[in-house]
């Protein structure tokens, strides 16, 4: 259906997966200081590029690309799976997702003998429930695991259909060629769940009408209960099950009042897109990239440079923008 589909996977330029990056059967990559990259690799429907920069002491993020059977059955559907797992509070949740989400997806696809929105929802739910069981087992020895979570952005290409699923604030952006003008336009494919967005704050208020402090502006940043910016995630059990929002969890994570229903959700927003020949490439990235590059800026970089090493170029462009903002802030300049 497509003459060419290129997946450019760029995980967050902040906490990184570093050497833990998983690219199916081919995990070879290069290290340049804190930058890890794989300039070019092949998957079932094209090629990909990956890059990430470590900024935190802990490697909290993971990502993966799987190509081939999307089912445990040899006769199952063929396609490509992309996952970006932006962890927070620690690496445990993102690592768990990396190890289990795709396996759940394959199992449910085998049961239905096809790929579907329902298969993806079930895979997310099974992954969430599996991590809950890990927290329950480790609670007494490692109670802080209850405050570990991860955003989870997934793309699945199967039979000419692209499925995009997301919890949290990572983003998938498509570059689409406009034949009449030759331009490549940026089209955002994913829905984000960050209370910095007014509509997400309204959603939280409507879901929790009796809680006037469900979202709080703290140090000029909107946060759920003053604690976390995302309204959906995998993990973060301390905001989903009240029995884990107590000692011996660190006091900074504990709410003064109990809650009767989960504050955060793990329900993914899922969209489907029939791929067309003028769909050129997709950028999968966590929020560290999008804080500094607009959708169109990122697409322009990809379109106007060679595909080899393009993810590395994107990450470096975001780092340069971040450094520029920091420099201007120190000098007292305002961005235009």
Image (tube, rainbow, N blue to C red):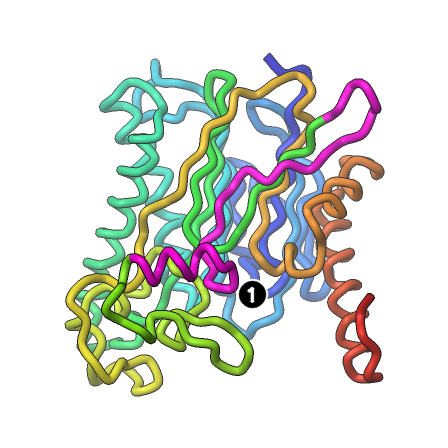
Quadrant (top left, top right, bottom left, bottom right) of the C terminus: bottom right
Residue 64 sits inside the magenta stretch: no
Where residue 104 sits in the image (x, y, percent)? 29, 38
- Where is residue 52, by image quadrant? bottom right
In the image, residue 158 sits, relative to residue 37, either above or below, namely: above
Q: Is residue 232 visible?
A: no
x 35%, y 74%: residue: 225
Where residue 252 sits in the image (x, y, percent)? 35, 85
x 62%, y 65%: residue: 54
Which residue carries the number 1 mark?
A: 15
- Where is residue 242, by image quadrant? bottom left
x 30%, y 26%: residue: 109
**Residue span colored magenta:** 177-206
**Front position in the image: 322 or 200:** 200
**Front position in the image: 149 or 49:** 149
**Front position in the image: 33 or 153:** 153
């Amino acid at each position: 259906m497509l003459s060419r589909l290129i997946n450019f996977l760029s995980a967050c330029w902040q906490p990184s997966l570093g050497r833990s990056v998983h690219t199916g059967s081919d995990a070879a990559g290069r290290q340049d200081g804190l930058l890890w990259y794989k300039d070019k690799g092949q998957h079932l429907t094209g090629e990909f590029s990956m890059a990430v920069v470590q900024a935190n002491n802990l490697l909290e993020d993971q990502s993966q690309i799987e190509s081939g059977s999307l089912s445990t059955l040899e006769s199952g559907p063929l396609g490509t799976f992309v996952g970006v797992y932006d962890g927070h509070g620690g690496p445990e949740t993102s690592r768990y997702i990396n190890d289990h989400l795709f396996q759940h997806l394959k199992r449910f696809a085998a049961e239905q003998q096809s790929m579907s929105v329902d298969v993806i929802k079930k895979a997310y739910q099974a992954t969430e429930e599996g991590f809950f069981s890990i927290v329950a087992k480790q609670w007494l020895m490692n109670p802080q695991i209850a405050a570990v979570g991860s955003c989870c952005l997934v793309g699945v290409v199967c039979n000419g259909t692209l499925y995009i699923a997301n919890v949290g604030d990572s983003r998938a952006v498509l570059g689409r060629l406009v034949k009449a003008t030759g331009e490549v336009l940026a089209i955002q494919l994913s829905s984000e769940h960050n209370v910095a967005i007014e509509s997400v704050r309204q959603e939280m208020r409507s879901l929790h009408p009796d809680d006037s402090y469900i979202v709080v502006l703290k140090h000029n940043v909107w946060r759920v209960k003053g604690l976390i910016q995302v309204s959906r995630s995998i993990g973060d059990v301390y905001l989903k099950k009240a029995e884990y929002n107590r000692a011996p969890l660190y006091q900074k994570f504990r709410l003064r009042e109990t809650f009767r229903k989960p504050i955060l959700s793990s329900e993914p927003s899922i969209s489907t897109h029939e791929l067309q020949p003028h769909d050129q490439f997709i950028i999968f990235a966590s929020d560290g990239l999008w804080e500094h590059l607009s959708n169109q800026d990122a697409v322009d970089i990809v379109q106007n440079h060679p595909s080899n090493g393009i993810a590395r170029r994107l990450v470096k462009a975001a780092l340069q923008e971040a450094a520029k903002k920091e420099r201007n802030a120190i000098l007292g300049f305002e961005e235009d």
